[in-house]
Amino acid sequence: MKTTELDKQNSHMLRKLIVVALVMFAFGYALVPLYKKICEVTGVYDLIKPDEIVNTQVDETRTVMMEFDANTRSEIGWEIIPLDVRMNVHPGELVHATFRLTNPTDMSFDAQAIPSYGPQHAVQYVKKLECFCFTQQKINAGETREFSVVFVIDPSLPSDVGTITLSYTMFEIEGTKNLGNQAFNPDIHEGKS
């Protein structure tokens, strides 16, 4: 079979495309060390080193006493307690507090935590980054779980505030009780038909 002029041109074009693809791959591969070198030379690399990140907003000249409290609004016997009752923190400092909830019953339920503050105007100075109060929580029968809140006290907190109390009340979401795998029905649970 004879090779036509068109077949020769296609073969030649294929070789060129393979060479171009290989050159592009090599350029992309070499770009990472080249980029790092450019960042080192220009000083940009020094700006992004994670070990040198410092929170300059922390006011270390001032300490605020954080008090934590928790309670439940339910008749079924579960309890929530703060693992750290008090902490001395600096405004601007990242704070992590943990609460433990225990459900000793044989019922599962959904719950929602609602925060409150003392003094009440402190709510605008406690900036929560992560909180179990943001979403409803599924609490299984016999379960013990730990919940976290991560927050920062705004450095603009008035100087006359030396103590802030952060309290959580855990509410049962009505209609979500489950006994075993069946929905909770008070008539059946109490033996009524």
Image (cartoon, rainbow, N blue to C red):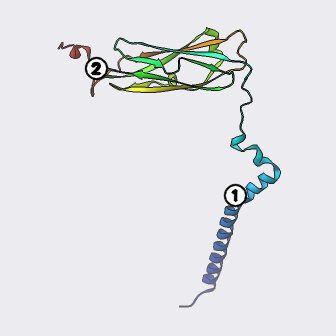
In the image, residue 39 sits, relative to residue 185, either above or below, namely: below
Residue 133 coordinates in the image, percent (x, y)? 51, 22
Q: Looking at this rendering, what residue extends furthest in the bottom direction? A: 1
On the picture, is 26 further left or further right than 173? right
> Quarter holding the C terminus?
top left
Q: Is mark 1 on a helix, strand or loop?
A: helix
Q: In which quarter of the image is residue 120?
A: top right
The residue that appears at 73% across and 27% down in the rendered structure is 57
On the picture, is 12 further left or further right than 189? right
In the image, residue 106 sits, relative to residue 190, either above or below, namely: below
Residue 108 coordinates in the image, percent (x, y)? 33, 23
Q: How many angstroms separate mark 1 from mark 2 (CA)?
A: 59 Å
The three-letter code of the residue at mark 2 reads Phe
Residue 148 coordinates in the image, percent (x, y)? 52, 26
The residue that appears at 43% across and 25% down in the rendered structure is 137
Observer-nearest of 74 and 15: 74
Which mark identifies residue 32? 1
Observer-nearest of 60 and 46: 60
On the picture, is 33 further left or further right than 10? right
Q: How crowded is mark 2: few (under 14 residues within 10 Å), some or many (20 or more)?
A: some
Observer-nearest of 89 and 37: 89
Residue 115 coordinates in the image, percent (x, y)? 53, 16
* Circles 1 and 2 in contact, beta carbons < 8 Å: no
Label located before the other in sequence (1 or 2): 1
Residue at which label 2 appears: 184
The three-letter code of the residue at mark 1 reads Val
Of the two numbered discs 1 and 2 in the rendering, the one whose residue sits closer to the viewer: 1
Q: How crowded is mark 1: few (under 14 residues within 10 Å), some or many (20 or more)?
A: few
The residue that appears at 72% across and 40% down in the rendered structure is 52
